[in-house]
Image (cartoon, rainbow, N blue to C red):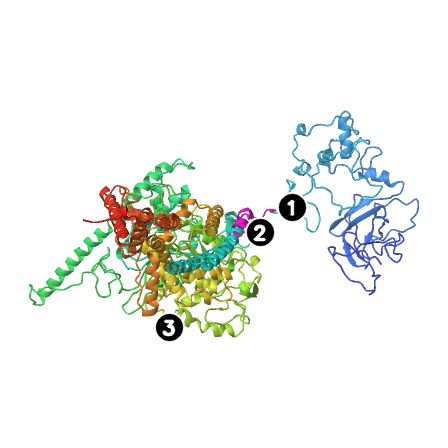
């Protein structure tokens, strides 16, 4: 049955008895997705007959066969019947209308029986007049329900104020348009319609002119007797949709192509007034991986296979065709060639999958720095970053270089309250300390200037030293004036920094002299002998008259380079959360900063404690001390480490790196490595200082595997990865070449494998089992006894999580949006005291620092080992190559310094090869090709042994008249030509997809041989001595010199500093030059000259000399400085030695007239 509400004003409740199997009834909302079927086929339906009557309201629903549809399983739902023009809400006391009312009875103002109500799923119920009695149209006309024009039943323009004429004649819009076209007179008062502009009435609301949405088919279904669109008096033409849109003020609906200017006000459950953000950037990814073009990569991989096959056939042919006349020469050559083939394969396999990546910084800003429901004030929701800068010796690393690096960090484009900078002074020098204080003072001028005028780069030395037009893209009128002021202030800052050594020395001498006078006076007061000398320590004094607790100028007990107390000094306090605007330019302020945030990030000076008898582990130990200090003072979930000479060249670099960390899947990334770019290198790059082949070829290729290696600087770390924790998800690669993959979840205790290489602590705060308590007891053993530091670990992990909508685990694995937009805790004295305690020299005793936690000890290349350990636990890394270089630094351009740098890297690789960090012992979580890359890191120094032999073989061939093959056959030449051509083609394709130049590739090849014959053999020797005899390896700090403006920029390039590393290359050059002369002379004086053997020997000797040419040029110093007589005597010496060799070992079958006799 159908039940209506007791009050006509209330919604009508219709209960439809179920005709289904259950026979019951159930309530269903209007949004329920039920099936529809016609009522006309169901005779039991209470709505199929017009004889059904309402029980209380005296109203009934009339339906038609085409219109009325409900569910086949009848349900109970509520229909909202809107008031019709003739029906207003009646009181509940009215009785129902009798079916057979009297004829003379006055017609009631109820048209329910003549109105069809349409509605249903997701649409509003509407009433349509279907049928009425004969007198109802007249009454409807009189009531103003329809248009007053004869024969028209259209809906009039509603409201008195909406009538086009003041007489109030009801007329529909179509008839009104016809009247305007036929004279413009009102059919009621016969007066002309007055224009709206003449009426001066603004009461016609804006809704009259707004575009209406297209009618929804869910709102009503047209009956045959109803017309949806009136004819436009063109029955013989097609429907003009454009005209209909204009005359009915309709629109194209709503969507991301077109949206109504005043919003969509259509009814419905999902209706909305304002358009949504269809291109919402918060749902877009922060990063995107761009693959290398298949037109380049496919031939590249094909050529690798072809060259591998050619090498196989060539080596097989060489083995099967020995040179029986010189078996020793053949044996040495084939051994070296086999090793070179293996070395090339290890180097080439990881390059099969290079990739490029790009970021979208606009999405990062919209997602983390825009106002939202969770973050109404729009505060930054980005996680904090702690920046580490390390220095050890102010003599080799000038304070001015370090100060410029610090200034570039303080001015970086990142939320000020989320940034903290820590300078590690491992030498404990007062010079570095006071230089940092001067830097903090100058930063109050430099940082607002950079923010106001968007300065790039934000290193003042690099910015003011640029040779390009500094006015480019600058539009502010005060830029030139303020730049001139800041430039003068920076010049004065440089003078103050440069004068600090003399200032500290003069101050210390004055204080020491005063102390001696006091001691003399006290001695005289005590009755002592005035002539007796008094021994007082020569202290180093701070400007406030206190002893410097670090290293003194004259080394004393407790104040020497390896024996001093720990020091922590906050030069700049943590900033406020809210921006602080500056003031106008005056005597105190050089620039107008009224529109600039003048806050500065926190800046802290740290010098860890050093005492005799403790192994301080060089740079790795200093970095671990910074990790603990920063965890207590700022606890940023991410860490950026930089060398003191590597400054931020791109102010958006930190944001670029954070895009990878905060994007979907970023919780598996342990670090983001940036390429190293260098300044101050000679234009010819004589010693391959740019190292572009490694940074643009090898590292890009590793990014397509498990990620690039850590190279020591320019890297953003996830703090929890440094703590030795495993990633939330990992993959084990087993089977042949890692073909079988197994998904792992190490942080789940049931699936975590407990081994010596893994730390899988749970961070889930919702877990209540006992395993978390058991593992929490192990934290002091791993990290030390500081409770403050231990409490900071879960906080750092939580702040480094992804947003909840990006993590599969949702609430438990992610963090809610806006959770980091909170003020940082203030820095107090107990916090600083706790930070001092964790940098003591004994804090790491009986802990896992340096073993599984932090930077790893035991190698001079701690960077590679640290990255290897993270990859071995299943983490992955990212290589971020920005359009504008992220960081720039300096590199040693002097030959000796460059060789010592390469020696240190190669020695670390040898240490890795003979340690448990060898990739042969890697876990299954490391990909196969990633293992190959790490194995090659430990193997490449050993190639130098075979390279030394192979560089001498051409000379031996020329001296003896033999060659590595029996004869230069066509087969040998074809193999040699195919190997050479494929190598050249591979190099061209590498240049194509990496973006390097042919000059860079050739310089890299040259220095590969220079390093392979000088530094690498010494590294192998040092590594073997350490492994076998336990001889410690000395560490030589690379000098970073500051160049004055008046000095030659490349003066260091021409300085010759003798080193034992130069002996092997010099010997190889001399032997090959003499061998060429001997070979030519032997062939000329021979009765049966063998030109093919001479050609083969000279070709390979010339190949060696071409690669060693930069080395020889470096030995000659500055161009023009070597006298000509040196070249003359060198040539004469080579000729004399050649003639002597011919006389000692004369060629067979010589002519008697060619016999040489000495008087």
Q: Earlier in the sequence, mark 3 or mark 2?
A: 2
Q: Earlier in the sequence, mark 1 or mark 2?
A: 1
State the separation of the CA atoms marked 3 and 2: 47 Å
Crowd band around label 2 with a 10 angstrom C-alpha radius: few (<14), some (14–19), many (20+): few
**Helix, strand or loop for disc 3:** loop
Vertical relation: 522 (above or below) 1120: below
- Circle number at residue 846: 3
Q: Which residue is mark 1?
A: 273
In the image, which residues are magenta? 277-301
State the separation of the CA atoms marked 1 and 2: 22 Å
Is the Cβ of the residue at disc 1 closer than 8 Å to that at disc 3? no
Q: Which residue is mark 2?
A: 283
Is 114 on the left or on the right of 521, as rendered?
right
Q: Nearer the viewer, residue 329 or 638?
A: 329
Q: Quadrant of residue 743?
A: bottom right
Q: Where residue 908 sits in the image (x, y, percent)?
A: 37, 61
């Amino acid at each position: 049955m159908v039940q209506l509400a007791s009050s006509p004003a209330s919604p009508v409740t219709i209960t439809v008895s179920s005709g289904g199997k259950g026979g019951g009834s159930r309530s269903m909302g209007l949004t329920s997705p039920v099936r529809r079927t016609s009522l006309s086929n169901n005779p039991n339906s209470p709505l199929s007959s017009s004889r059904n009557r309402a029980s209380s309201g005296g109203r009934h629903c009339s339906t038609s066969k085409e219109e009325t549809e409900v569910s086949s399983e009848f349900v109970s739902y509520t229909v909202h019947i809107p008031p019709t023009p003739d029906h207003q809400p009646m009181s509940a006391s009215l009785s129902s209308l009798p079916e057979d009312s009297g004829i003379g009875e006055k017609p009631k103002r109820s048209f329910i029986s003549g109105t069809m109500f349409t509605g249903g799923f997701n649409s509003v119920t509407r009433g349509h007049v279907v049928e009425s009695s004969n007198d109802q149209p007249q009454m409807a006309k009189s009531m103003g329900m329809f248009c007053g024009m004869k024969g028209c039943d259209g809906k009039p323009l509603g409201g008195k104020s909406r009538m086009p004429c003041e007489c109030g004649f009801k007329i529909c819009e179509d008839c009104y348009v016809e009247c305007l076209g036929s004279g413009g007179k009102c059919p009621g008062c016969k007066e002309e319609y007055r224009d709206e502009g003449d009426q001066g009435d603004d009461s016609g609301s804006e809704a009259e002119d707004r575009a209406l949405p297209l009618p929804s088919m869910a709102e009503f279904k047209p009956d045959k007797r109803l017309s949806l669109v009136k004819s436009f008096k063109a029955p013989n033409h097609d429907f003009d949709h454009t005209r209909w849109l204009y005359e009915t003020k309709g629109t194209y609906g709503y969507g991301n192509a077109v949206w109504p200017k005043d919003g969509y006000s259509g009814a419905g459950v999902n209706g909305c007034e304002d358009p949504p953000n269809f291109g919402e950037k918060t749902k877009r990814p922060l990063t995107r991986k761009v693959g290398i073009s298949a037109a380049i990569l496919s031939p590249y991989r094909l050529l690798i296979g072809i060259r591998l096959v050619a090498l196989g056939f060539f080596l097989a042919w060489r083995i099967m065709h020995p040179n029986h006349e010189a078996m020793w020469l053949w044996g040495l050559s084939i051994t070296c060639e086999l090793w070179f083939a293996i070395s090339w394969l290890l180097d080439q396999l990881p390059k099969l999958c290079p990739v490029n990546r790009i970021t979208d910084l606009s999405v990062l800003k919209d997602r983390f720095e825009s106002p939202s429901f969770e973050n109404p004030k729009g505060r930054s929701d980005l996680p904090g970053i702690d920046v580490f800068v390390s220095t050890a010796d102010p003599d080799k690393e000038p304070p001015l270089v370090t100060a410029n690096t610090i200034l570039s960090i303080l001015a970086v484009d990142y939320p000020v309250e989320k940034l903290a900078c820590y300078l590690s002074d491992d030498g404990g020098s007062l010079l570095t300390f006071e230089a940092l204080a001067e830097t903090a003072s100058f930063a109050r001028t430099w940082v607002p200037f950079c923010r106001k005028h968007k300065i790039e780069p934000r290193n003042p030395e690099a910015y003011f030293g640029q040779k390009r037009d500094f006015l480019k893209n600058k539009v502010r009128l005060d830029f030139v004036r303020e730049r001139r002021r800041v430039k003068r202030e920076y010049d004065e800052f440089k003078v103050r920094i440069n004068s600090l050594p003399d200032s500290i020395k003069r101050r210390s001498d004055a204080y020491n002299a005063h102390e001696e006078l006091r001691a003399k006076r006290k001695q005289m007061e005590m009755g002592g002998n005035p002539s007796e000398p008094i021994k007082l320590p020569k202290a180093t004094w701070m400007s406030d008259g206190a002893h410097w607790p670090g290293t003194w100028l004259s080394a004393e007990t407790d104040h020497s380079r390896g024996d001093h107390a720990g020091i922590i000094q906050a030069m700049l306090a943590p900033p406020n959360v809210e921006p602080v605007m500056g003031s106008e330019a005056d005597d105190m302020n050089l620039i107008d900063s009224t529109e600039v945030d003048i806050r500065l990030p926190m800046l802290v000076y740290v010098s860890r404690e050093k005492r005799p008898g403790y192994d301080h582990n060089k740079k790795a130990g200093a970095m671990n001390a910074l990790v603990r200090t920063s965890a207590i003072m700022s606890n940023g979930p991410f860490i950026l480490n930089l060398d003191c000479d590597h400054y931020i060249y791109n102010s958006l670099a930190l944001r670029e790196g954070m895009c990878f960390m905060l994007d979907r899947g970023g919780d598996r990334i342990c670090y983001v490595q940036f390429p190293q770019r260098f300044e101050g290198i000679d234009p010819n790059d004589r010693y391959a200082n740019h190292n572009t082949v490694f940074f643009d070829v090898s590292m890009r290729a590793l990014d397509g595997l498990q990620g690039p290696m850590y190279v020591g600087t320019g890297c953003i770390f996830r703090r929890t990865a440094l703590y030795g924790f495993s990633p939330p998800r990992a993959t084990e690669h087993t089977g042949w070449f890692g073909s079988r993959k197994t998904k792992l979840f190490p942080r789940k205790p049931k699936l975590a494998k407990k081994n010596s290489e893994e730390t899988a602590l749970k961070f889930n705060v919702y877990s209540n089992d006992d395993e978390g308590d058991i593992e929490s007891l192990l934290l002091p053993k791993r990290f030390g006894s500081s409770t403050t530091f231990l409490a900071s670990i879960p906080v750092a992990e939580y702040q480094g999580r992804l947003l909840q909508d990006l993590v599969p685990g949702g609430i438990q694995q992610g963090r809610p949006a806006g959770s980091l937009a909170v003020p940082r805790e203030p820095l107090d004295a107990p916090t600083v005291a706790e930070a001092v305690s964790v940098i003591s020299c004994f804090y790491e005793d009986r802990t896992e620092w340096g073993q599984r936690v932090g930077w790893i000890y035991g190698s001079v290349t701690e960077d590679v080992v640290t990255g290897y350990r993270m990859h071995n636990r299943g983490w992955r890394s990212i290589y971020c190559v920005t359009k504008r270089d992220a960081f720039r630094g300096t590199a040693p351009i002097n030959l000796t310094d460059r060789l010592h740098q390469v020696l240190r890297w190669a020695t670390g690789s040898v240490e890795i090869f003979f340690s448990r960090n060898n990739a042969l012992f890697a876990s299954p979580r490391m990909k196969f090709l990633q293992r190959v890359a790490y194995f090659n890191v430990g193997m490449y120094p050993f190639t130098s042994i075979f390279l030394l032999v192979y560089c001498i073989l051409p000379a031996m061939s020329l001296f003896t008249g033999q060659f590595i093959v029996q004869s230069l056959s066509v087969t040998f030449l074809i193999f040699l030509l195919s190997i050479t051509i494929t190598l050249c083609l591979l190099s061209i394709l590498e240049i194509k997809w990496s973006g390097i130049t042919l000059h860079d590739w050739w310089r890299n090849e040259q220095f590969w041989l220079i390093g392979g014959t000088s530094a690498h053999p010494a590294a192998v020797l040092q590594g073997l001595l350490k492994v076998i005899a336990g001889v410690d390896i000395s560490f030589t700090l690379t000098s970073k010199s500051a160049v004055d403006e008046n000095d030659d920029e490349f003066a260091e390039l021409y300085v010759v500093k003798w080193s034992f590393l130069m002996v092997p290359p010099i010997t190889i050059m001399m032997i090959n030059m003499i061998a060429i002369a001997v070979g030519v002379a032997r062939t000329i004086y021979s009765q049966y000259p063998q030109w093919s053997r001479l050609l083969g020997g000279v070709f390979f000797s010339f190949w060696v000399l071409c690669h060693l040419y930069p080395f020889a040029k470096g030995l000659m110093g500055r161009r023009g400085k070597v006298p000509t007589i040196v070249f003359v005597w060198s040539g004469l010496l080579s000729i004399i030695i050649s003639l002597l060799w011919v006389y000692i070992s004369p060629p067979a079958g010589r002519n008697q007239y060619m016999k040489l006799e000495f008087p």
